[in-house]
Amino acid sequence: MALDRWIGLVLLGVCLVYGYAAWFTMDDMLAPFMQRNPIWPSTFPKVLSLLGIAASLVIVLGLEKGEAKIGDIDYRKLWEYNLGQALLLLGLMVLYALLLRPAGFILSTSGFLILGSVILGERRFILTVIIAAIATGVVWYLVQVVLGIFLRPLPVFMGI
Amino acid sequence: MLEGLLIGLQTALSIQNLLMVIGGCLIGTFIGMLPGLGPMSIIAIMIPVAISMGDPSAALILLAGVYYGAIFGGSTSSILLNAPGVAGTVASSFDGFPMARQGKAGKALTIAAIASFAGGTIGAVLLMVFAPMLSSVALLFHSAEYFALMVVGLSAIAAFAGTGQVAKALLMTILGLIMATVGEGALFNMPRFTMGLMDLQSGFGFITLAMAMFALPEALFLVLKPRDTQESDGDIKDLRITRAEAKAIAPVIGRQSIQGFFIGVLPGAGATIASFLGYAVERNIASKEEQAEFGKGSIKGLAAPETANNAACTGSFVPLLTLGIPGSGTTAILLGALIALNVTPGPRLMIDEPQIFWAVIMSMFIGNLVLLVLNLPLIPYIAKVLSIPRNFLIPFILFFTLMGAYIGQNNATELLLLVGFGIFATILRFADYPLAPLLIGFILGGMLENNFARSMQLYDGVSFIWERPMTLGLLVIAAILIILPSYRSRRARIRASGIADGD
């Protein structure tokens, strides 16, 4: 089974769960006066779940034949590309998400930019550090001062 | 209309807005030139900036400038490097890159700039004529018709964007609609489908989703498969074109501006289809000896897609500004930005806030002029951006997607959602699922449900579907749009297999 049909299967599951939530769990919470309304909060989701199940079934069962195309990247040979770098960068993004608040903007952002370049194979460390430091400073200034959105600059234990 | 033009000029010619146009065009050109970053990602990245400015006309002017600049920048990289930054400029590389190879890079860029300028300007004139007409018709619409119109728009997008696989595009649209129902709706104040998570109470952030659907997969694709860009040798010089060349491309520009504009107005079609179709049409109607030149550096073959894609970009503003229904991914992102700024595009826009509507049109003229007068001479310098090493570029792209999602909501959970959806979107792209329908469905979802609910309440049930002929007609059109392509491909397949079995 090709990847697009597997995805269709997963989305079918999503639609089924969504449909279950819409058909069976939402209406009990409705206040009695709202039940006299012609439309309930669950009406639109109910319709959507049916449409979604129908569309994903068409894909899973392969009712609509299209020629299999290989785009920019052939997922069957994923390991031939720079998969490791991509996964490491994604991990780095998750780390950034978790550390942004506790470690402060300056530390986490410069760390992200430096490590990102290093993961991609950059070995001129001094240049990397200088670029990351300048970029962090400029972005912090723009966001904090120009746009006026608060970004905690320093780690938690060092004050604000 | 004259009054409107003057209002627009008054707004657009303020110092702040002029700076917005110039800045937007420059930023757009800069980033649009980088291979792998299309106008959708750039606009998604720019949205937090635009929203925090607080002035809707300035924001829309900035974003429109970025949009134009991105298309222009994309054609620059496809001419110089044969690496189109934007799908809409792929057709420009057919003839632009051979010209650059022959040492006529400067001439190719000038032709591209002039063609873009003419396409954009003629498109803006057509927009000025057609948008008020369309919006006076749209004022007659009832919420039931709006509901039906959005269904037509969504199914047209699914039918066109699906590249022969309507079911996939349809599923993506429905998924977008499903995602729009998460959180608290405007009509009923109770949380739906939040799974008890506080972070989902206000629904998914639209900027987060836009970044995750477009910017992040593109960046990941750049990591996975470094593009091998072919350097064009030599400097960019000799930006002039001769009188004979100008005469040759003038009719092409005229035809393609009009054709591109109307393709752009159709939901789901947009700049990419307009440019390919423009190229194909011009090749077919060219004379024999000119036809042989196409693909080897024909100036007509460069002017056609360049004109068409800019005219289509302008055309795609028509449904956005008059009906409030975006026809393409880019205008869907613009719609989200406008809603965040408390402006609802639609037929009332021209009556309630004419200064926004006309200022945008005026800034289109100014933006096109800026691209021609300011950007063209700067191109040799801007093209230096192409030599930024990828090791520095990619971390910055990723960082800007993260920052955009974070400062929109000021919530670190949003970043985890961004990464999660980004991985999901990348997998979907592997399997050739179109992503624009998902975002358009997500943005239209709330409006679609509200209009549906309103007409249900007015008619006390679904009877509005058959009691209002216009609604019924529109819904029938929507059904035909979905069924027809799959029916035709099925018939073609049956016929093809019949021939194969015949011997």
Image: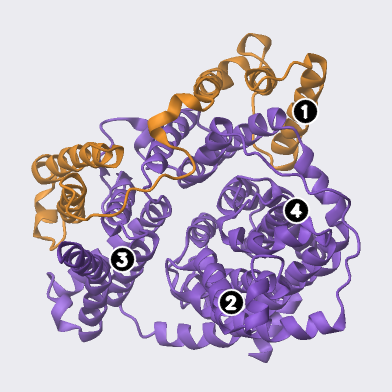
Chain colours: A orange, B purple
Per the image, the residue denoted by label 1 is A137
> SS for tag 1?
helix
Separation of marks 2 and 1 at Cα, in angstroms:
52 Å
Label 2 vs label 1, nearer the camera: 2
- Going from N to C along the chain, the mark reached first, 4 or 2, is 4
Q: Quadrant of residue B90?
A: bottom right
Residue at the spot of label 4? B80
Tell me residue B282's x, y (percent): 59, 79
> What amino acid is found at the position of numbered circle 3 in the picture?
Ser
The percent coordinates of residue B358 (x first, y second) are 64, 77
Q: Amino acid at mark 2?
A: Arg
Which secondary structure, mark 2? Answer: helix
How many residues crowd mark 3 within 10 Å: few (<14), some (14–19), many (20+)?
many
Query: Do tags 2 and 3 sit on the same chain?
Result: yes
Where is B239 relative to B459, above or below?
above
Q: Relative to A66, does residue B305 appear above or below in the rendering?
A: below
In three-dimensional space, the C-alpha distance between marks 2 and 3, rounded to whole angstroms, equals: 31 Å
Q: Are marks 4 and 1 on the same chain?
A: no
Labelled disc at residue B283? 2
Q: Earlier in the sequence, mark 2 or mark 3?
A: 3
* Residue B363 visible in rendering: no
Determine the CA span between mark 4 and mark 1.
33 Å
Instruction: Describe the element under mark 4 as helix, strand or loop.
Output: helix
In the rendered structure, the answer to whether residue B306 lies left or right of residue A68 reads right
Closer to the eye: label 4 or 2: 2
